[in-house]
Image (tube, rainbow, N blue to C red):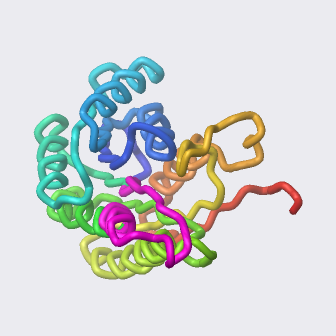
Amino acid sequence: MENLKGKVALITGGTKGIGYGVAEALLNQGLKVVITSRDRHSADKAAKDLASKTNTTGAVIGIQADVRFLDNQKDAVDQAVKTFGQLDIVIANAGLGHFGSIEELTSEQWSDVIDTNLTGVFNSIKASVDALKKSKGYYITISSLAGTNFFAGGSAYNASKFGVTGFTQAVMLDLRQYGVKVSTIMPGSVSTHFNGNEPSDEGAWKIQIEDIGELVVDLLKMNPRTLPSKIEVRPTTPPSK
C-alpha cells in the first residue's frame, strides 16, 4: 500500500486518544477516514474537528457503532463502503479498562473489558473480511504491552490484550493467503485520557498519539512483500523509579 492517497480507513474508537491521532495522520496522507464511537455526538464532533484541523472537509465521517455488537460493525462497514466506495484499512482501536484485584473486579467489569477490547476486535475484523479481501487491504489492531506483560490488578485488561495479541497473529496467518496484511501494535505508556488520565506537560515523556499515527502510516507504506506482524513500542526515557 505504498500509495495511500484515496484509500479508505475505518477506525474504531476514533474520537479521542490513539484512534484520533491515527485518523489525523491518515487524513494528512490523503486518505478518506471513517471514525466510530458508541456516542453519535462524539463521533460527529470528532469528525468535524478532524476535518477542520486537517483541511479535509468531505474526507472524514463519524458513525455511531458499538464494537461489542457484530451488527453495529457490519453497519459501519456498509456505511464506509456506501460513502467512499471501498474499504482498504481497518484500525481496531476501541478499548477501555477496569482495574483492581480479582477480589474487587465485578463480573460486569470483566464483561465490559472483554466484550469491548477482545470481542470488539473480532467483530471489527469479522464484519469487514469480504471488503478487505476485495481491496487486498490491511488490518491493524491496537493491543498493548499489557498483552505480553501481566501486572497486579490487571486481570481483565491483561486477559483482553493477551487475547488481542494472539487473535491478531492467528488472523494474520489466516488472511495473508488473500493478500491481506495484518499487524498488531503494542504500545506502552501513551499520553491519552485512558483510565482517567489527563494529558499534560508532565506526560511529555510518554508516547504521543501522533507517534502512533506516524507508526501506522509507516506500516501502510511498507513494501507489500514485508509484514511487521507484531510491533512493541515504548517511551524512550521513562521516569526513574
Residue 90, image x and y in percent? 32, 54
**Marker count (numbered):** 0
Q: Residue at x 50, y 52 (%)?
A: 216
Q: Toward which corner of the image does residue 19 lie, by quadrant?
A: top left
Residue 22 visible in the displayed image:
yes
Q: Nearer the viewer, residue 197 or 240?
A: 197
Identity of the residue furthest to the right in this view = 240
Residue 107, image x and y in percent? 34, 72
**Is 19 left or right of 42, judged from the image as shown?**
right
Identity of the residue furthest to the front in this view = 103
Q: Nearer the viewer, residue 230 or 4?
A: 230
Residue 46 position (above or below residue 103):
above
Q: Which residues are magenta?
A: 92-117
Q: Residue at x 34, y 62 (%)?
A: 112
Residue 74 position (above or below residue 14):
below
Q: Nearer the viewer, residue 47 or 95?
A: 95
- Magenta-span inclusion, residue 131: no
Residue 208, image x and y in percent? 64, 44
**Is 63 left or right of 195, judged from the image as shown?**
left
- Magenta-span inclusion, residue 94: yes
Q: Residue at x 20, y 66 (%)?
A: 126
Q: Residue at x 45, y 77 (%)?
A: 159
Q: Toward which corner of the image does residue 132 lie, by quadrant?
A: bottom left
Residue 159 position (above or below residue 141):
below
Residue 125 position (above or below residue 171):
above
Residue 238, image x and y in percent? 80, 56
Q: Nearer the viewer, residue 51 or 226?
A: 51
Q: Toward which corner of the image does residue 186 lie, by quadrant?
A: bottom right
**Is 236 left or right of 19, judged from the image as shown?**
right
Residue 180 visible in the displayed image:
no
